[in-house]
Amino acid sequence: MEKICFVCTGNTCRSIMAERLLKKQLKDAHITNIKVFSKGLRAKGDNIAENAKKVLKSLGALSSNRKSIKLGKIDKDMLYIAMNENMLKYIQSSNVITMKNLIGHDIDDPYGQSEDVYMKTALEIMEANDKLIEIIKRWRKQ
């Protein structure tokens, strides 16, 4: 069983969207046995952002409330994916990459911005997830 955890700042926008979008994309690609999580470096138990919920719903992903979860103990068997390179110094794991590794740029934080900005962020995340799924498929063929 592979495990993936997306990490952002507060776990109310980017990482939770990435988690829920990847779950949908994996299901659509008929890929099983992967557990997907998300956490925040400074999560405080806040609910998912309203615009994140709206965008997730419009993209057919789970859009229900969930409290943010703070990144705690590192799981040595988990692949961590940080939304930007600045987060690397806070994730003490040899199993960490960034969105920049997948799509060539960081994912900006849409917190407090318009639904259109959240949609742009979600589409960038889906592009990165597509790259991740390609890697998973190649790895599983070996």
Image (cartoon, grey):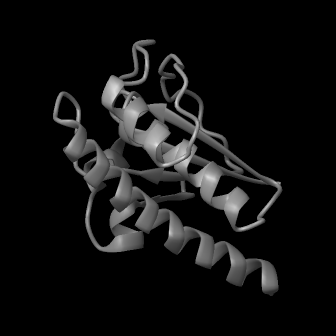
* Image-based side of 90 in relation to 36, left or right: left
The C terminus, quarter of image: bottom right
Tell me where residue 56 appears, x and y as whole percent. Answer: 46, 40
**Visible residue check, residue 109:** no
* Image-based side of 131 in relation to 114, left or right: right
Tell me where residue 54 appears, x and y as whole percent. Answer: 39, 33
Going 48% across and 38% down the picture, which residue do you hit?
57
The N terminus, quarter of image: bottom right
* Image-based side of 92 in relation to 86, left or right: right
Going 48% across and 49% down the picture, which residue do you hit?
59
**Visible residue check, residue 49:** yes
* Image-based side of 129 in relation to 48, left or right: right
Quarter of the view holding residue 135: bottom right
Indicate whether 82 appears above or below 110: below
Residue projecting furthest to the front: 58
Tell me where residue 131 appears, x and y as whole percent. Answer: 50, 74
Going 18% across and 27% down the picture, which residue do you hit?
112
Going 38% across and 40% down the picture, which residue do you hit?
55
Indicate whether 9 appears above or below 27: above
Near-viewer residue (81 or 66): 66
Quarter of the view holding residue 141: bottom right
Near-viewer residue (82 or 121): 121
Residue projecting furthest to the bottom: 142
Indicate whether 29 appears above or below 50: below
Indicate whether 46 appears above or below 118: above
